[in-house]
Amino acid sequence: METVSTAKAHGGTQGVYRHASTATGTDMTFSVYVPDHAPGAKLPVVWYLSGLTCTHANVTDKGEYRRACAEHGLIFVAPDTSPRGDDVPDEDRWDFGKGAGFYVDATQAPWSAYYRMWSYVTGELPALIASAFPADMARQSIMGHSMGGHGALTTALRHPDRFRAVSAFAPIVAPTQVPWGGALDRYLGDDMAAKRRHDAVALIEDGARVKELLVDQGDADSFLAEQLRPELLAEACAAAGIDLTLRMRSGYDHSYHFISTFMADHLAWHAARLRA
């Protein structure tokens, strides 16, 4: 693992790191904030999955999470959203290919050679975090935004014993029912069972469970009606008996102005469950 940069923030260390990934076959860059802590202490970990077009840098630069992480003693990990590099196949569009890995392991050529973000964020990167940072891997939670909200919800629903809490900002809750879900068709082909395993609403319909969910959604979000459709998640959670807190935020859009406004609320919510 190579250290790209470090900086002191709120008494802790904000770092950016790079390593050669076996899952994606490329170098992958990620950021980790580690708050000040006693020597030998192990700290709970919050994973943050970013949205379409993003890298690790968007939340690192604009998420305004460090003060809350320092207050609550939380390690904050932000991976990239896709493999990168000249050899990685791509298309000239912002909602598919580089920056749009959708946190799946692609099965369709040419994407399957590199686009293995599910294996990366659920297997390879956690093992690296456990070995290189003072992380208490028995106390993990996960959150995300938009495409990353989709990734956080599906990851938690498929690993309910690993994550003590899950939350999302403006998540894609049902990709098989919205236009952005066309990416799953490209990555996973005609395998509807595979696509349902990467659809939070479908997972809940098929029996996956978590105790509770926290979702914030801006009502001025331009993607709300066509792509995000939080009402589908509300209906699925109501039918399954999952405690969903869905907060519609008046006047807020899809940007990091929205995310940064409510980031501390989410981290406090995570911290309370990570202490339990």
Image (cartoon, grey):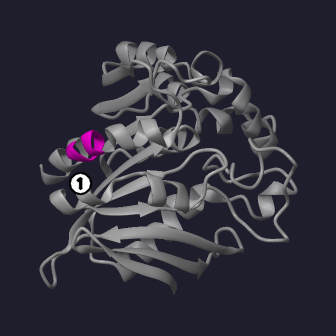
Using residue 29 as the reference point, say whether residue 186 is left or right of it: right
The structure residue drawn at horizontal position 78% and vertical position 58%, both measured from the top left corner, is: 112
Residue 172 magenta-highlighted: no
Disc 1 residue type (three-letter): Ala
How many discs appear?
A: 1
Q: Position of residue 147 (x, y in %)?
A: 58, 40
Q: Residues within 10 Å of mark 1 (few under 14, many from 20)?
A: some
Q: Quadrant of residue 226?
A: top right
In this rendering, the answer to whether 160 lies above or below 65 is: above
Q: Position of residue 250 (x, y in %)?
A: 39, 18
Asked if residue 52 shows in the view, the reply is: yes
Q: Position of residue 213 (x, y in %)?
A: 33, 31
The structure residue drawn at horizontal position 54% and vertical position 37%, both measured from the top left corner, is: 146
Q: Nearer the viewer, residue 244 or 76?
A: 76
Secondary structure that dominates the magenta span: helix
Asked if residue 157 shows in the view, the reply is: no
Residue 265 magenta-highlighted: yes
Q: Secondary structure at mark 1?
A: helix
Using residue 222 as the reference point, say whether residue 35 is left or right of it: left
Using residue 24 as the reference point, say whether residue 128 is left or right of it: left
In this rendering, the answer to whether 98 lies above or below 203 is: below
Q: Which residue is mark 1?
A: 68
In this rendering, the answer to whether 122 lies above or below 154 is: below
Q: Nearer the viewer, residue 274 or 108?
A: 274
Q: Which residues are magenta?
A: 264-268
The structure residue drawn at horizontal position 52% and vertical position 69%, both measured from the top left corner, is: 30
Using residue 136 as the reference point, say whether residue 239 is left or right of it: right
Q: Nearer the viewer, residue 147 or 155?
A: 147
